[in-house]
């Protein structure tokens, strides 16, 4: 994946242009801890350190760094975070839930997936993308080696579902996200 970059007149701002759309419409800006919860990608970029803000449009991600931070250090790390995140297929910005309580459940699900499930799947050359939470059912998509694995159903039921149901009582089941039916 080739991501073009562009320096701006402000030496502390750099624009990144991935080959695929980031947002369907509008824009989003992330400048503090509260706003970061709405974008796992922005959160990962902030975690690199030396970042002041992240601004995202449909085709561009603009990063503002602290004056002391160096682009030579940050740019390759930001590019890696963008590529890694786009490979998950997850939304760049988490859409607001119609129900705030459901929004908290979605955050818990994504946190468990990122902390417990994804690292185990990556060891086997696979990955998992959270797609949605609806009526107590978590829809995920297994990726990489896991998508075609003969044990995919076992992974979903005995791995993913067991972990999510143990920690999050609102989760009743985990199902594979079927693109054709959605």
Image (cartoon, rainbow, N blue to C red):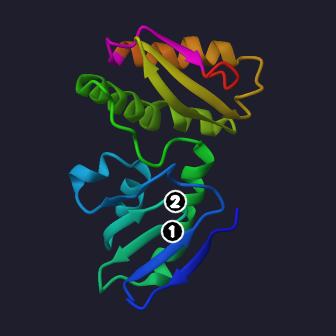
**Residue at 38% of width from left, 65% of height from top?**
55
Q: Are marks 2 and 1 in contact (CB under 8 Å)?
A: yes
When the figure is inspected, residue 80 is found, relative to residue 159, above or below; the finding is below
Secondary structure of residue under mark 1: helix
Task: Kindly give the residue lying farthest to the front in the view shown.
Answer: 25
Residue closer to the observer: 42 or 55: 55
Query: Gap in Å between the C-alphas at discs 2 and 1?
Result: 6 Å
Q: Which residue is depicted at the point 58% across and 33% down?
A: 128
Residue 97 position, x and y percent, is 33, 30
Q: Quadrant of the N terminus?
A: bottom right
**Image mark for residue 77:** 1
Nearest the eye: 158 or 74: 74
Label 1, residues with CA under 10 Å away: few <14, some 14-19, many ≥20: some
What residue would you read off at disc 2?
A: 81
Task: From the top left corner, tell me how far across and down residue 129 is, in percent.
Answer: 56, 34
> Callout 2: 10 Å neighbours few (<14), some, many (20+)?
some
Residue 168 sits inside the magenta stretch: yes
Which quadrant of the figure has residue 88?
top right
Q: What span is colored magenta in the figure?
A: 167-176
């Amino acid at each position: 994946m080739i991501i073009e970059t562009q320096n701006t007149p402000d030496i502390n701002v750099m624009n990144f242009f991935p080959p695929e759309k980031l947002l369907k419409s509008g824009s989003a800006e992330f400048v503090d801890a509260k706003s970061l919860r709405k974008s796992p990608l922005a959160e990962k970029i902030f975690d690199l350190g030396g970042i002041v803000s992240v601004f995202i449009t449909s085709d561009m991600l603009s990063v503002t760094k602290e004056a002391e931070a160096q682009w030579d250090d940050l740019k390759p790390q930001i590019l890696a975070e963008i590529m890694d995140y786009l490979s998950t297929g997850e939304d760049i910005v988490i859409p607001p839930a119609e129900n705030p309580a459901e929004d908290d459940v979605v955050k818990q699900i994504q946190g468990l997936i990122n902390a417990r499930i994804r690292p185990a799947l990556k060891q086997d050359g696979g990955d998992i993308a959270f797609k949605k939470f609806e009526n107590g059912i978590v829809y995920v998509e297994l990726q990489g080696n896991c998508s075609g694995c003969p044990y995919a159903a076992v992974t979903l039921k005995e791995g993913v579902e067991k972990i999510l149901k143990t920690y999050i009582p609102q989760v009743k089941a985990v199902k594979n996200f079927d693109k054709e039916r959605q």
